[in-house]
Image (cartoon, helix red, strand yellow):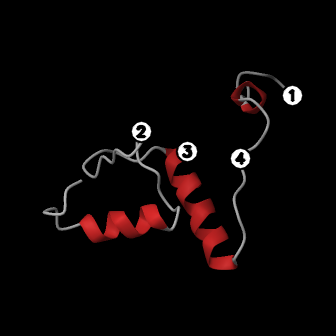
Amino acid sequence: VTENNWFFENVKTAYELGFMNGKSEGKFDPNGNVTVVEGITMASRLHALYNGTEVKPSEKGVEEYIFDFEQKF
């Protein structure tokens, strides 16, 4: 994102507030798609920002969050 982009100030503010970090270190993709996980992450961060709290990374590995939807109950 360069200063010439019309959305530069919005991206800068979102980054400075910790609402978004980009697709990779310091890189944003304003024309890309947002995944469900990215949407949930942004909503969580916005909620925390609005309520004066913090979203802390989990110490669990991603494998602990994988759910087998084929499993019968």
Residue position marked by numbered label 1 in the rendering: 73
Label placed on residue 37 = 3
Q: Residues within 10 Å of mark 3 (few under 14, many from 20)?
A: few
Residue 15 place in picture, x, y as percent? 44, 61
Residue position marked by numbered label 4 in the rendering: 57
Residue at horizontal 72 percent and vertical 53 percent from the top: 56
For marks 1 and 2 on the same chain, the one whose residue lies earlier in the sequence: 2
In whole angstroms, how far apart are the C-alphas of marks 3 and 1? 25 Å
In what element is the residue under mark 2?
loop
Name the image quarter holding residue 45: bottom right
In whole angstroms, how far apart are the C-alphas of marks 4 and 2? 17 Å
Residue at horizontal 63 percent and vertical 61 percent from the top: 44
Q: Is residue 5 above or below residue 34?
A: below
Q: Amino acid at mark 4?
A: Pro
Label placed on residue 43 = none
Residue at horizontal 74 percent and vertical 33 percent from the top: 65
For marks 4 and 3 on the same chain, the one whose residue lies earlier in the sequence: 3
In whole angstroms, how far apart are the C-alphas of marks 2 and 3? 15 Å
